[in-house]
Image: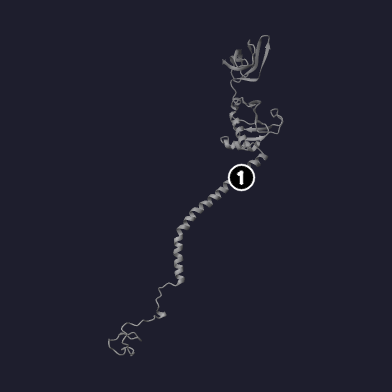
Amino acid sequence: MYCKKCGAKNKFGDQVCGDCGERLSKFSVFPPKTTPDPAQAPQNHATPTAQINKNGCGCLLALLPIIALVLVLVIPLVIWKNSSATIAETQAEIIRAYTTTKTEGPLEASTEDSAGASKLISAATGADETQAAVILQILNNCGVMPKSIAADSGENDYVQAGSLGFRISTDIADNIILSLANDKTVLGIQYAETFLYENGTMLKQLKEILTPPDLELIGEITTRSSYSSTYIKGKVRNNTDQAYSYVTITFGVYDEEGNRLDTASSIIQNLGAGEVWSFEALTMADNISDYKLIELSGTQF
């Protein structure tokens, strides 16, 4: 039996509580339900706010891997964008530099850098990318790789009416003349009064002029006729410091269809060092349309 008032346990059949004296009911066979004192309530239950904070921390911890992944993806993208912007600015600066230098003086480019030489030509002459590539190819065919290009404002015989003249410098020679039409077609390339390229035809390479052959055909070749004979006239120079015991020159002569009709030859004995020989090579062929050099040779003492 339990006391309803104090909850003390009493013997079955007791009429009053042995602790508080309260009269016992015959139905009080179970411990009475008690209401806990708020002051004595357990303190280990989290308040709603604490629970929220605890849950928030858990969510934050769960989001950390996602945040890290986002940072890994975003940071390189930002760096790449900044890098791209820097490259674009650099390219723009290069273009501005070319434009500025064009008005102030000759441009410079590496002799081993075809792309740089093409840009150099484009900036100096106003040619577009395709035109500049064609000009560079023709220059290269003549053994010329531009290092600097400057507009030629002087009066020159090579500059045709309405054409444009430029002076080119390379690692091995200066003052190579480039003549362009207004449409940027190459009219001529000239060095030291000798054409390397003219009217669509490559005539010489620069190194041939800088290092002339031992026996060199110089000046203009002409012909004269006398009765039934034709003479091919010109000059040969001995560029060495030794004399030749003899020198011979031979031309082939051709008709309109390109058939060889005959040969015209001439010979000289004792051509001294640095001397020039004025020759006349004789042929008896008729109906001559063209002639070509076949041989120029000699024997030194």
Residue 285 drawn above or below residue 112: above
Residue type at mark 1 is Ala
| Residue 64 in view here | yes
| Residue 96, position as x, y percentages in the image | 63, 43
- Residue receiving disc 1: 92
Q: State which quarter of the image contains the C terminus.
A: top right
Query: Which residue sits furthest left?
Result: 12
| Residue 246, position as x, y percentages in the image | 59, 13
Q: Residues within 10 Å of mark 1 (few under 14, many from 20)?
A: few
For the point 64% across and 38% down, which residue is it? 123
| Residue 97, position as x, y percentages in the image | 63, 42
For numbered disc 1, what is the local secondary structure? helix
Residue 89 drawn above or below residue 219: below
How is the protein colored in the picture?
A: one colour
Q: State which quarter of the image contains the N terminus.
A: bottom left
For the point 45% across and 63% down, which residue is it? 59
